[in-house]
């Protein structure tokens, strides 16, 4: 019998993860099945345990269950521990092992697929929710010159900054030489960033976060963590501000999936053909 994996979310029906993992399995000759399972908002733990009891070997976790998955994990990788969120679970004899592959996926997409170096850049991360916390430590570790965390509610950005400054110190990750700051959105006026990453959920409602003029450096990169229509409002704003290099999070999705696949199967699939196929199939 094939080994079973699943992505849990709510909603999850439109997830592209089953197609990605099926492609990885074909490519590497691994005998797995991978499905999308919707868990009730108050029933994630029960759904997960039922899946493990039925022979599931591991799971991806998406919105809105990543924090709960972190709490449910019996052991966690250092990067999941710091993120405070888990997107990958492996069901081991010792219990649930929790990892977070989102940040590694983002860095692999930006630096690898898009060929854009983060080291030495001024970076702006928008948002202070679950998506932002998944990528913050790997972003700091990529050695930007300056990193600003900006959020509509400034206090959430401040709290996240403090939490991650402490995590960085504990893991000997150096803070950016021009500063690691938390700001409200209006306070971004006058700043200019080479890499602007949208980790807000504003795009789901079809409007970008309200940013002051000239926050984008036109020679830089605008990146949205989500993919498809939800990324459009932010990427259109970047285009209107003259940014030529823009990307949605489809590459990150494929890269984080490859990292999860490696954790489960011990083999790293090639991502480029899968990403090209997904882009071509729309
Ligand atoms: P996720 O897990 O997707 O990060 P979340 O934890 O609900 O979801 O966080 C959503 C993020 O998007 C928050 O940073 C939120 O800002 P607030 O903390 O001020 O609520 C941000 N966000 C949502 N809608 C927004 C909008 N219209 N403009 C700017 N930021 C927005």
Image (cartoon, helix red, strand yellow):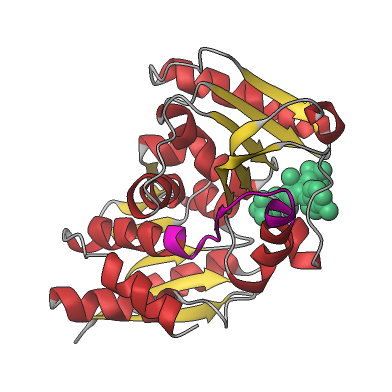
Q: Position of residue 162 (x, y in %)?
A: 64, 21
The answer to whether one can see residue 238 in this image is yes
Q: Is residue 10 visible?
A: no
Residue at 74% x, 66% y: name it: 204
**Corner quadrant of residue 216:** top right
Give coordinates of residue 255: x percent, y percent.
36, 58
Instruction: Establish if 40 lies above or below 79.
Output: below
Name the residue: 71% across, 27% down: 159
Would you identify the image quadrant in which residue 133 lies?
Answer: top right
Indicate whether residue 238 is drawn in magenta.
yes
Q: In the rendered structure, does residue 83 fall within the stretch colored magenta?
A: no
Q: How many marks?
A: 0
- Relative to residue 2, is residue 193 depicted above or below? above
In the image, taking residue 61 as reference, residue 228 lies left or right, namely: right
* Residue 40 percent across, percent down from the top left: 65, 74
Give the left or right position of residue 105, taking residue 10 as reference.
left
Quarter assignment of residue 231: bottom right
Q: In the orientation shown, which residue stands out farthest toward the top?
A: 177
- Closer-to-camera residue (264/164): 164
Relative depth, front residue between 34 and 103: 103
Q: Which of the pair 44/161 is nearer the observer?
A: 161
Q: Residue at x 58, y 26 (%)?
A: 147
Which residue corresponds to the image point at 79% horizontal and 25% vertical from the top-left? 190
Q: Where does the magenta region start and end?
A: 237-252
Quadrant for the N terminus, please: bottom left
| Residue 61 image offset from top left, x and y in percent | 50, 62
């Amino acid at each position: 019998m094939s080994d079973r994996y699943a992505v849990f979310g709510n909603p999850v029906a439109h997830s592209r993860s089953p197609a990605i993992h099926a492609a990885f399995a074909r490519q590497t000759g691994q005998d797995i099945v991978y499905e999308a399972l919707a868990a009730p908002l108050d029933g994630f733990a029960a759904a997960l345990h039922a899946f493990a009891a039925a022979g599931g070997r591991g799971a991806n976790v998406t919105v809105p269950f990543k924090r709960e998955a972190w709490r449910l994990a019996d052991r966690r990788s250092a990067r999941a521990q710091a993120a405070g969120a888990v997107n990958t679970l492996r069901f081991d004899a010792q219990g649930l092992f929790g990892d977070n592959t989102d940040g590694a996926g983002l860095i692999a997409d930006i630096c690898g697929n898009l060929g854009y170096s983060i080291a030495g850049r001024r970076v702006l991360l928008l948002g202070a929710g679950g998506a932002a916390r998944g990528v913050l430590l790997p972003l700091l570790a990529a050695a930007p010159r300056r990193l600003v965390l900006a959020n509509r509610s400034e206090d959430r950005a401040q709290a996240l900054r403090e939490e991650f400054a402490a995590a960085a110190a504990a893991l000997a990750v150096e803070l950016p030489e021009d500063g690691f700051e938390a700001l409200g959105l209006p306070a971004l006026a006058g700043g200019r960033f080479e890499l602007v990453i949208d980790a807000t959920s504003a795009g789901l409602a079809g409007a970008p976060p309200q940013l002051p003029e000239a926050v984008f450096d036109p020679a830089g990169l605008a990146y949205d963590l989500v993919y498809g229509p939800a990324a459009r409002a932010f990427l259109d704003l970047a285009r209107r501000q003259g940014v030529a290099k823009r990307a949605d999070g489809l590459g990150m999705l494929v890269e984080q999936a490859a990292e999860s696949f490696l954790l489960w199967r011990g083999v790293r699939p090639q991502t480029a053909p899968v990403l090209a196929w997904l882009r071509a199939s729309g």
